[in-house]
Image: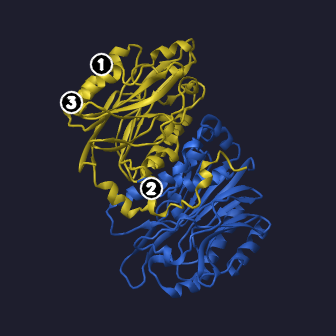
Chain colours: A yellow, B blue
Amino acid sequence: MKSTLIVSAIQQTCNEDRQTNLAFSILKIREAAEANADLVVLPELHLGPYFCQNEDPSHFDLAQPIPGPTTDILSTLAKELKIVIVSTIFEKRAPGLYHNTAVVFDKDGSIAGKYRKMHIPDDPGFYEKYYFTPGDMGFTPIETSIGKLGVLICWDQWYPEAARLMALAGAELLIYPTAIGWDPEDAKEEKQRQLDAWITIQRSHAVANGIPVISCNRVGFEQAPDSTKGIEFWGNSFIAGPQGEIITQANASEITLLNCPLDGQKSDQVRRIWPFLRDRRIDAYSDLNKRFID
Amino acid sequence: MKSTLIVSAIQQTCNEDRQTNLAFSILKIREAAEANADLVVLPELHLGPYFCQNEDPSHFDLAQPIPGPTTDILSTLAKELKIVIVSTIFEKRAPGLYHNTAVVFDKDGSIAGKYRKMHIPDDPGFYEKYYFTPGDMGFTPIETSIGKLGVLICWDQWYPEAARLMALAGAELLIYPTAIGWDPEDAKEEKQRQLDAWITIQRSHAVANGIPVISCNRVGFEQAPDSTKGIEFWGNSFIAGPQGEIITQANASEITLLNCPLDGQKSDQVRRIWPFLRDRRIDAYSDLNKRFID
């Protein structure tokens, strides 16, 4: 990793007009580049509304191949601005085979790599198991000109296993594009517990592995089709250092460009005072491969 | 687990006079019992000062067998008060074979089980690898009359693997007796980052596994032998619910008896809204058994 890496996250709304959303993302990527960012992260599936609030076969029309029209645009932009971009695309891999896929563009415009979401949720309002085939590329960091990026997606953020596997494979940074929010009908206290839990678990991945975390969420209320229900996306995108310390954080409702420097030497120092990797009991972890121990 | 479980943690100092320390612990256990506690947790190695600040062969004289004199006393007390007690003992298992061992006494005074610390630290001021043979009993919850207890010890708290394995084996509660503190020479900001990281990672185990966490630390400054250095034990013992929400927390310096009820049905509810165990990619976790992926 460079001695100082400037990283950005774009917290934005994702409305019906996909062209306007992408144009807005590009505007913000340009702003990040003007602020000398080496890396910029977009929210999960930033091209449009979170379409998994219902199960509708026509939504598969939203998917694209990789490379495809959106990656072509972002590839050109990455090259022009000499910036690493992390995007998430509804990927059409083959007829009837779709993934929720992060694509990383290097500063030369090439696709440095992709990551297909491994943990797929399915809850009321988040019917992802219908749309997304679980990833089959494992937890492999993406090698770029600025370092090895451990890119994971949303639901993955609740799994310490995913973060650890990325760190063991050499990830120098964890990146979580996300689309998560509240059920507006939940009580205020429950909303706060959910948000706190979400921040806590992602900060803990920084702590456990001694590497920074970038979490990028969307904002805005999106109504479910044919329903009065919807999701109030809770924003709170943040960038944390390798002790889990929050460096910069957005609020729950505003469009925000987060931008901060990361010290490329800090992880090495933190892992000296907290040498967790040294003491892992790899002789005693085999049951992690089990569903449950009955 | 009972529909309501009342749990306690005793944050205390651990001075040179071992009899006085134990007498004080017993006084506080009696207070917890008067407050109807079902379970009470003592800090790690609560009998005396944290002796791992240097390497001294004579310190092995502090070890005891299990069962032994201290467990006999706590066993009698558990039976008298009908309370589950979690103690941590410097265990002499055989000549030249010592462990850092948690012992759980059930309400009938029996030893319900023990746990030998699996992850052993070794850092300036914390020379535990000299004293403690790494545990060989794995991550097995201890079955008691009040539920299955996932007892882990101090350094274990930094490992999501340990918490997960306990949860997969049916633990309904995670318990961390601890002796952790600051190097007084560290800057204030560094101290705050360390404390925040320690709280964050333990709360994250509650979140990831949907079960409550009890963390019990000591307080007070303890000077290292033949040195001007020492450790300022940072207290901050806490009890968190299954979303990682802190229910009650002590401060950094005061002797405190924490006491609160836990809702025995809450974990089941939380795991319904966040069904993380359902979606673990056990087909893709085998590298967790590796030291590093070169």
Check disc 3 and give the amino acid type: Leu
Label 1 and label 3 in one chain? yes
Task: Please report the residue visible at 62 percent of the width from the left and 53 percent of the height from the top.
Answer: A287
The quadrant of the rendering that contains the C terminus of chain B is: bottom left
Mark 1 or 3, closer to the camera: 3
Tag shown at residue B292: 2
Quarter assignment of residue A145: top left
In screen coordinates, is B253 left or right of A7? right
Q: In the image, is residue A18 above or below residue A232? A: above
The x and y percentages for residue A198 are: 49, 40
The x and y percentages for residue A158 are: 52, 41
Quarter assignment of residue B176: bottom right
Q: In the image, is residue A38 above or below residue B10? A: above
In screen coordinates, is B131 left or right of B223? right
The x and y percentages for residue B252 are: 46, 62
Q: Chain of mark 2?
A: B
Helix or strand or loop: what does disc 1 sit on?
Answer: helix
Is residue B28 in sight in this rendering? no
Query: In the rendered image, which residue does mark 1 sit on?
Result: A23
**Viewer-nearest residue: B14 or A83:** A83
Task: Please report the residue visible at 41 percent of the width from the left and 62 percent of the height from the top.
Answer: A274
Q: Residues within 10 Å of mark 3 (few under 14, many from 20)?
A: some
Query: In the rendered image, which residue does mark 3 sit on?
Result: A81
Tag shown at residue B29: none
